[in-house]
Image (cartoon, rainbow, N blue to C red):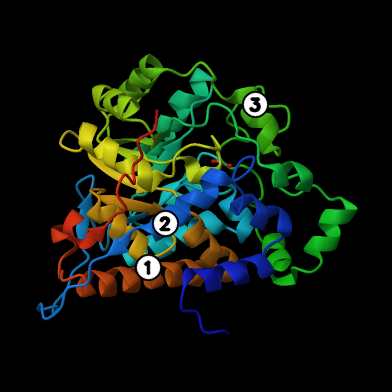
Amino acid sequence: MPTITNIEDLKRLHRRRAPKMFYDYCESGSWSEQTFRENTSDFDQIRLRQRVAIDMANRSTATQLIGQDVAMPVALAPVGLTGMQNADGEIKAAKAAEKFGVPYCLSTMSICSIEDVAANTSKPFWMQVYTLKDDDFMRGLFDRAKAANCSAAVITVDLQLLGQRHKDLKNGLSAPPKLTPKSIANMATKVPWGLEMLQTKRRFFGNIVGHAKGVNDPASLTTWTAESFDQSLNWDRIREFRKMWNGPLIIKGILDPRDAIEACNVGADAIVVSNHGGRQLDGALSSIRALEPIMDAVGDKIEVHLDSGIRSGQDVLKAVAMGAKGAWIGRAYIYGLGAMGEAGVTKALEVIHKELDTSMALCGHRDVNTVDRDILMVPKNFSGDWS
Ligand code: GLV
């Protein structure tokens, strides 16, 4: 077993162990991938301010997200097809998250169903909700989340239609994978992945198959999003969803202060500043650049989280110092899952925790709740003077 010291190590193993179709799905942005790249490169532009001779004994990264105790200000973001990166992937990721003490958010586009994850975990998880046209499906999804004791619903508002990711089209992405000479040749080199996959029945979109009507090819993400997603979604419709779900509500996919204000007005408990990992509108601002104007607009009204571009504990620290209450990781834990299953997700969380804890200490803080903007050196005009 190689020595793993950072998220990049897990990414290399993930690439080696998972079929190309699924690694590529994880590692794609839309069109030119500009936003996907800038999500990470913009974090690199921010520097940390070192302080010395400050007592750094007895540190704590514990805090709360939407009133729930967490071991560090990190949540596992909803990621489609997680159970294709590694058999039963959603269950493995949820187990690693609950042992570590951070929230796990299950995607509507998961392979393991809500019921499956609930039956195999012991702490409540968060349920991400895509907004489909089928009203019965939507009511059913909220009811299923309630029955599974989910402790928050996360409505994603930036995917009424799917941004084009070239690699997925070229690879013929589907779940389960369609057997073509190319996919068979590639999967033949991924023996441990294949053996585990043969031992599980969870190979379809578990929340959809048998629940959603009028989906002609539920194996194809592109086809079923185009057929089922509600392109007419608006804030009134989100108000209706608010009525269907009376638990904590998080709205994910906000990049503009005006939309952040709308999310406050519909009664959300938190928003997630996110560009969907650079997978939707290519050319949009990176999340970390979009954060400050949103904090200025709604930071005193609602809890703000940040998603997209987090690959280290230092990125978490930077997001928190800019005002985010928490940071969501997607690819960073999926690399771990694809590399080594549940142990890989745990490793990703350990790596991020250690980086966060050490960097926080070297910036002169012992408690993540006292970290503020003062630890950052941000290039002038980082948020931009765009016209
Ligand atoms: C779905 O959430 C995707 O980005 O593919």
Which residue type carries mark 3?
Answer: Ala
Residue 88 percent across, percent down from the top left: 57, 58
Q: How far is disc 1 from disc 2 in space, using C-alphas?
A: 10 Å
The answer to whether the residue bearing label 2 lies less than 8 angstroms from the nearest atom of ligand 1 is: no
Q: Determine whether, in the image, residue 67 is placed left or right of residue 332.
A: left
Residue 260 percent across, percent down from the top left: 30, 30
Q: Which mark is residue 226?
A: 3
Q: Which residue is mark 1?
A: 352
Q: Earlier in the sequence, mark 2 or mark 3?
A: 3
Between label 2 and label 3, give the one nearer the viewer: 2
Q: Residues within 10 Å of mark 3 (few under 14, many from 20)?
A: some
Which residue type carries mark 2?
Answer: Ile
Q: Which of 236 and 318 lies nearest the eye of the viewer?
A: 318
Between label 1 and label 2, give the one nearer the viewer: 2
Q: Residue 366 sits in which quadrant?
A: bottom left
Q: Is residue 277 above or below residue 359?
A: above
Between label 1 and label 3, give the one nearer the viewer: 1
Task: Give the SS element for disc 3.
Answer: helix
Residue visible at 61% across and 42% down in the picture = 205
Task: Give the SS element for disc 1.
Answer: helix
Q: Earlier in the sequence, mark 1 or mark 3?
A: 3
Residue 201 percent across, percent down from the top left: 66, 53
Q: Is residue 171 visible?
A: yes
Residue visible at 49% across and 26% down in the picture = 131
Q: Which residue is mark 2?
A: 310
